[in-house]
Amino acid sequence: MKNVTKLKIASDVIEDLIPELDDLVTKITKASAVFAVQDDRKTIMPVDLEKALEDILRRKSLTVNELVQKIEPLSILELKDLSKQIKQKAEDLLKQRSSKNKKR
């Protein structure tokens, strides 16, 4: 990071970045594996990595309208479950943000 900016980098920034990068590498690896399996291979190839990187790093976030269109086919029970999951995710993110702010 120091090679990219003249600013000082706090040590907790590095500590916070490492698990985020680990998570990103895991997502990329899993997506690469999916692409390899789709092509009936047991080996992840550079093309799989390229597709995974494109899919994960360069995709745009869906708009709320796009999300609503995607969930329209769901049954009422599936929508209820989705609602619970979204609520839980929001609560988890708020807790994470709160604990990170307390560390600073």
Image (tube, helix red, strand yellow):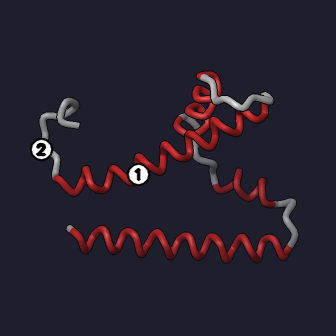
- Amino acid identity at mark 2: Lys
Disc ID at residue 20: 1
Q: Quadrant of residue 70?
A: bottom right
The residue at the point 43 percent across, 48 percent down is 22
- SS under mark 1: helix
Q: Which residue carries the number 2 mark?
A: 8
- Amino acid identity at mark 1: Glu
Could you tell me which quadrant the C terminus lies in?
A: bottom left
Up the image or down, 102 lies above or below 65; here it is below
The residue at the point 58 percent across, 26 percent down is 50
Residue 26: x and y, percent? Answer: 53, 46
Mark closest to the chain's N terminus, 2 or 1: 2
Disc ID at residue 89: none
Residue 35: x and y, percent? Answer: 71, 33
Q: CA distance from mark 2 to mark 1?
A: 20 Å
Could you tell me which quadrant the N terminus lies in?
A: top left
The residue at the point 72 percent across, 32 percent down is 42
Name the side, left or right, on which 73 lies relative to 1.
Answer: right
Determine the residue located farthest toward the front in the rendered image.
42
Name the side, left or right, on which 19 lies relative to 66.
Answer: left
Name the side, left or right, on which 62 lies relative to 40.
Answer: left
Whether residues under marks 2 and 1 lie with C-beta atoms below 8 angstroms apart, the answer is no
The residue at the point 56 percent across, 70 percent down is 89
Up the image or down, 39 lies above or below 62; here it is above
Q: Return the residue nearer the eye: 100 or 25.
A: 25
- SS under mark 2: loop
